[in-house]
Each structure stands twice: as C-alpha cells, then as structure tokens.
Amino acid sequence: YINKSNSINSNPAPKSLMRAWMCHGRTHREMVEKLASAGIARSPICKEALLKVDRKNYVLDPEFAYDDAPQPIGYGATISAPHMHAHVLEDLLPPLLQSSKHKPDKQLSILDVGCGSGYLVSVFGRMVEKERMEPKLNKGKVYGIDVIPQLVEMSRKNILKEDGDLLESDTVQVMVGDGWKGYPEGAPYNAIHVGAAAATFPKNLMAQLAVGGVMVIPVGPDGGVQYLYRVERVGDDGGVVGIGGDDSKIGFLEEDFKVYRVLGVRYVPLVRTDD
C-alpha cells in the first residue's frame, strides 16, 4: 500500500506506554486506576468505560484477569494487555468527539476487527451507549467481527454475563467476518480497531473509514517486525464505502490517508479467508 509518494510519519512511543506492563491490579478497579495513574487511560470517558466492563468476564482464567499482560483465549487468539486496550481507546476517542461536534445528530459507527473474547467491543459499547453532552459525544453502534465462529460465540456469551444490555439495546453486534474485507454494512466508520497484525495495509478496510475517521492497526509479518499504525482518513477522492452510490465502483487513493507509525508490537496474524 505505502509507496514513496505517501511516506509513513514515525511518531515516538508515548511516554505513558513506557510505564506499561506494570499496571497489574488485584481488583478490576485497581487495574483501571493504575492505567489512569500511569497516564495511559487519560480521559474520563475512557476510564469510565473501562470501569464499567469487568475484564474477568472476558478471559479464560479469572485469576489473571487483572494482569497487565496478553492472555490466550483459545483458537490461536489472545486478549491484549490492558495497557494496549487503554491506548487504543484513547487513540480512537478524538475522531469520535470530532464527528460528534461537527455532526451532532449523526450516530457514531465503530468497527472492532478480531473481536476475540468480546472485551473491547463491550468497552466501546459503554463509551457510546448514550449521548453525552460534556464533552459532546454522540450515541453509537459498535460492530465486532472475527473470522473464527467459536470466538464470535464466546464473545456473545461473555457479553451476556454482565453487559447483555448492550446486545439487547443493539448498541453492539458481533458476527463472523473476514477482517481484510471489513463489514461494509456498518460503514462508514468513525473508528476502526484491528486486533491482529495484517501483513499489509488492508485497502478494503481503509475504504470503509469515514473522512476524519481513524483506524488503529498492527502491520507486519507473522513472527517478524510489526508496528502499530494510526491511519487517518483525510479525503474522499477515492470514495467512501457506505456513502450512497454503488460501493463496488469505489476506488482507492493513497492520498486520502495519512499514516503514522506509533510503536513496535507483537500480534497474532490477521487471518484472510478465501474469496
């Protein structure tokens, strides 16, 4: 995707993430408070959402639910460390606030690719389950997709434990889907989170970003050097999926996007299904 005409801007890792891996808690609240004290969960909106969703409901072994480390959830997948989830939430909050400011009556749309055990879907859901006024944040809908049917079923079961109202209110929806193709039915998205490493930047997924929308995605080969990138949509010359017309005729222009490299990471690969 990236060529010489569209260079990647390299940002240094946020200082707050230098204190990551140390935000272990004996309780759910203690974990979140440590994320806040470390400057990772900075905004009241993100902190409140994290406090509302108990991580123990989304891990296989509740004994380690509040460790600041990734944990396996089966089927070759993992749930990311709490500090990474908090970082993603903070990175994706600004485009949600910006859209709410400029389009106060338009529902927000968020896509979580590789929803795994359902944790981040629920946290996003708590962020947008109702309209907020200070700061202005519109109500929204969160779509979670995973290529592994068993994980989608796990997500549903986990959400139903204590966050079932999000499903009942249609604030969140989880389904089987190929992350490389995204979920056009919910586009255009104000925020997209990808929880597995893509070998290259997925054009179909990027085309589903709204102008002003942001995608956070790890990119790099399986077992090789990977980086977390922030992809911001700044133009619509290539067309935006979900904005009228025939989506099949939408092209792709690199100039519509700005790409920032954030920090080095290690993720499981983003699985691609056969066409």
Image: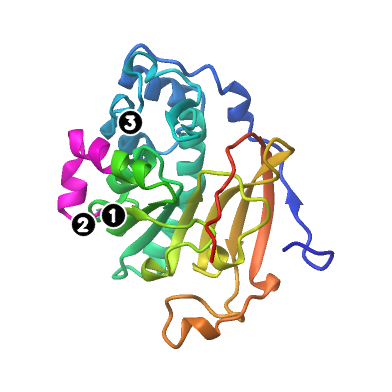
| 2 and 1 marks in contact (CB < 8 Å) | yes
The residue most toward the front is 274
Sooner in the amino-acid sequence: mark 2 or mark 3: 3
In percent of the image, x 61 and y 61: which residue is there?
A: 202
Categorize mark 3 by other alpha carbons within 10 Å: few (<14), some (14-19), many (20+).
many
Marks 2, 3: nearer the viewer? 3
The secondary element bearing badge 1 is classed as strand
Alpha carbons under labels 1 and 3: distance apart: 16 Å
At label 2, which amino acid type do we have? Asp
Q: Percent from the top left, x then y, of residue 232?
A: 59, 60
At label 3, which amino acid type do we have? Tyr
Q: Is residue 139 left or right of residue 169?
A: right
Residue hosting label 1: 173
Q: Percent from the top left, x then y, of residue 91?
A: 52, 46
Q: What stretch is highlighted in magenta?
A: 156-172
The tag on residue 170 is 2
- Determine whether 130 is above or below 162 in the image: below
